[in-house]
Every structure is written in structure tokens, then in C-alpha cells.
Image (spheres, rainbow, N blue to C red):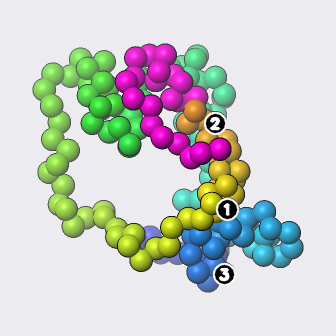
Amino acid sequence: FAAKWSRQETLAFQAFASANELAEALFLPGQRGIDAALAMKSVRHTSRNLSDSFSLHGFDLVLRPPVWIIRQEHLHQDLAAFLERIGHRGGIDLNDDDPATRRMSYADIPPLSDLARQNLQRWYAQDVEFLRACDAWLARNGAGTEPQRLAG
């Protein structure tokens, strides 16, 4: 299912040929940098901070802790820990999905440059810190492996 682009998204995707080009333009002086920031705020999946979806009050991991945090990069391990914490007996089959659905090939998409990565880390600084807080919470609560994050 592909959502129809808004007028703002159409302009954003016309202004930048790739995600790398857009990310490299972030924080540039002048109109190109402004256009990059406007493009980031115009695309649905880049316009909001991930942390706002989970923690609107700052100390939610302390005052309203989750049962568990399931990270995509540790899906099976974290899901097993979650299921154990809620007392679920038996497994869940995650492999019954049609392999042709929800998969995209990234073979033709250029990789992100170091500058693009640095700019995205700066753009998403709140999310980077939120993920760091989640990793620390998991470590304090018995998670085994900490995921690799963007290098700072």
C-alpha cells in the first residue's frame, strides 16, 4: 500500500534526487539549506520526532515504565523477553508473512555519506537521545545485547 504524496511531499521529492542529497543539504547556509529543512518537515515519515510518539513527558521511562521495549534490530530476543514478562506461554510465528509484501530493494539507492549521517544525527538529536535512554533502560532491566547506533 503506497500512500498518495501530498503537495508538500511532491515538492520535497522534486527538489532532492535522493535521501543522501537531501541529508547533505541540511544546515547549509542559504536557500538550499532552507529547502532541505522544509522538505524534511514536508515528508510524513521525516516530519516528526519518534520520541514524541512514545514519551511526551520526559520521564515516562521512570514514572510510567513499559513492560518491555522491542527493538527491530533485536526483534526475536526482545519479543521473547516481552512475552515472558507478560506470562505468554508458547511461541509466535513471525515467518508466516508473504515474502513479497512490505519489502523494498535498496540496491539502487545511494548510501548515505558521512556528511549526510552527521546531519541526520543532528536533525534527529532528540530521537538519538531517546533511543539512548531506551537502551539504558533495557540494560538496567536485564536486556542482553545493546544495538549499534549512529556514531557520534
Q: Marks 1/3: CA distance?
A: 19 Å
Going 26% across and 20% down the picture, which residue do you hit?
A: 84
Q: Amino acid at mark 3?
A: Ala
Q: Earlier in the sequence, mark 3 or mark 2?
A: 3
Indicate the position of residue 151 as horizontal and vertical percent values. Answer: 59, 45
The nearer-to-camera label among 3 and 2 is 2
Query: Is most of the magenta stretch helix, strand or loop?
Result: loop
Image-based side of 45 in relation to 104, left or right: right
Q: Which mark is residue 105?
A: none
Q: Marks 1/2: CA distance?
A: 20 Å
Q: Is residue 7 visible?
A: no
Q: Is residue 61 visible?
A: yes
Which region of the structure is painted magenta? 133-152
**Residue of label 3:** 15
Q: Amino acid at mark 1?
A: Leu
**Residue of label 2:** 129
Image-based side of 65 in relation to 78, left or right: right
The nearer-to-camera label among 1 and 2 is 1
Going 39% across and 29% down the picture, which residue do you hit?
A: 145
From this view, report whether residue 85 is shown above or below residue 18: above
Q: Marks 3/2: CA distance?
A: 30 Å
Label 2 near label 3: C-beta < 8 Å?
Answer: no
The nearer-to-camera label among 1 and 3 is 1
**Residue of label 1:** 115
How crowded pointer 1 is (Cα within 10 Å; few <14, some 14-19, many 20+) is rated as some
